[in-house]
Amino acid sequence: MTERIILQTEHLRRTFGGLVAVDDVSLQVRRGTLHSIIGPNGAGKTTLFNLMSGVLPPTSGRILFEGRDITNVPAHGIAHLGIGRSFQITNIFPSLTVLENVRLAAQAVGKHNFTFWRDYRAFPEYIERAWEVLAMVGLQKRAHLPAGTLAHGDKRKLELAMILAPNPRLLLLDEPTAGMASEQVPELMALIERIRAVGDKTIVLVEHNMHVVMAASDVITVMVQGRVLAEGAPAEIRADERVQRAYLGQLYEE
Ligand SMILES: Nc1ncnc2c1ncn2[C@@H]1O[C@H](COP(=O)(O)OP(=O)(O)OP(=O)(O)O)[C@@H](O)[C@H]1O
C-alpha cells in the first residue's frame, strides 16, 4: 500500500518564535497524481514546501519520501533523492544561455556536481539531457539566447525545464503561473499536465489561480492558519461549506 504514497508528512509542525506556521499537518500524496495545496495568504503553504524540500527543518513531525525518512535531509540531499522544487523567486542565471541554465541544473544534481563550472563540453550527457527537456517545454529555438532576455512566460518554462533536468520523480511547484498574463496560463498548465502524464511524475502544486487548481488537480488540500481544513477531489472541495466560508467564497466574489 505504502508504494502508492510517494510523499507523506506526519504531524508536521513548524514555528517561528510564537507563530505556528505549519500546525500538525499529516498529508499523503499518491504517486502519479497532481495534488494541490491551497489556502489564504499566510496559511503556511510555502513553509510546508520549505519543510518538504529541506529548506527548513520542522520543529516536530516527520516527512517520508518513498517510505524513507527524509525529515532532516538538507535541500541538496533532497534534490539528489529525486525531489525537484521551484521557487516563487526565480533561480535563473540571466547572463547564461537558456541551454547553459538547464545544463547546470542537470549537472548540479548529477554525479559531477563538484565540478559545476568545468568546461561544459566535458559532460555531453548533461547537454543531451538539457536539449531533451528544452524540447519537452518547447524552448529549443531559444536555447542560445541569454536567459535574462526571455519573456516572463518563457522564463517560467525555463524554470520548469531546470526542475525537470535532473529527472525528479516528485515536483514541488510553488505558484508556477504567478505573474503570467492570463492568456499564457492554459499553455503552462497543459505543459504541466503533459509532464505528469507522459513523464510519470507526481506533482505537488501551490497555486492561487482557482480555475487552474480546480481543472488540473486530482486532490486538493486546503490549509488555513497552518492546519489542514479539508482534503478531497476538486468537486468535493468546491462544495465544502467550511472551505467556502474560510476561503473560496471570498475568492470567487473578488
Ligand atoms: N522565515 C520566517 N520567519 C518568520 N515568520 C515566517 C517565516 N516564513 C513564514 N513566516 C510566517 O508563517 C506564516 C505562513 O507563511 P507562508 O509563507 O508559509 O504562507 P503561505 O500560505 O505560503 O502564504 P502566501 O500564499 O502569501 O505565499 C505567515 O504568518 C508568515 O508570516
Image (tube, rainbow, N blue to C red):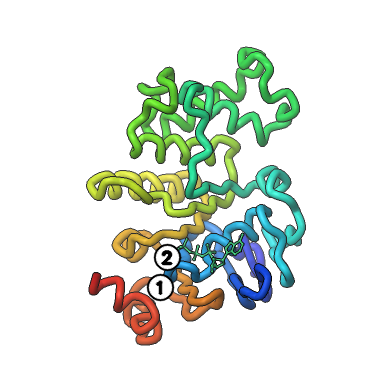
**Quadrant (top left/top right/bottom left/bottom right) for the C terminus:** bottom left
Q: Which numbered circle lies on residue 140?
A: none
- Counting residues from the start of the chain, the first of labels 2 and 1 encountered is 2
Residue on which the image places disc 1:
233
Q: Is residue 241 visible?
A: yes
For the view shown, which residue lies furthest in the front direction?
A: 17
**Quadrant (top left/top right/bottom left/bottom right) for the N terminus:** bottom right
The residues bearing labels 2 and 1 have C-alpha atoms spaced at a distance of 6 Å
Q: Residues within 10 Å of mark 2 (few under 14, many from 20)?
A: some
- Residue 58 in the image: state x and y as whole percent: 70, 65
- Residue 56 in the image: state x and y as whole percent: 68, 57
- Residue 191 in the image: state x and y as whole percent: 37, 44
Q: Which numbered circle lies on residue 218?
A: 2
Q: Amino acid at mark 1?
A: Ala
Q: Is residue 14 visible?
A: no
Q: Nearer the viewer, residue 199 or 162?
A: 162
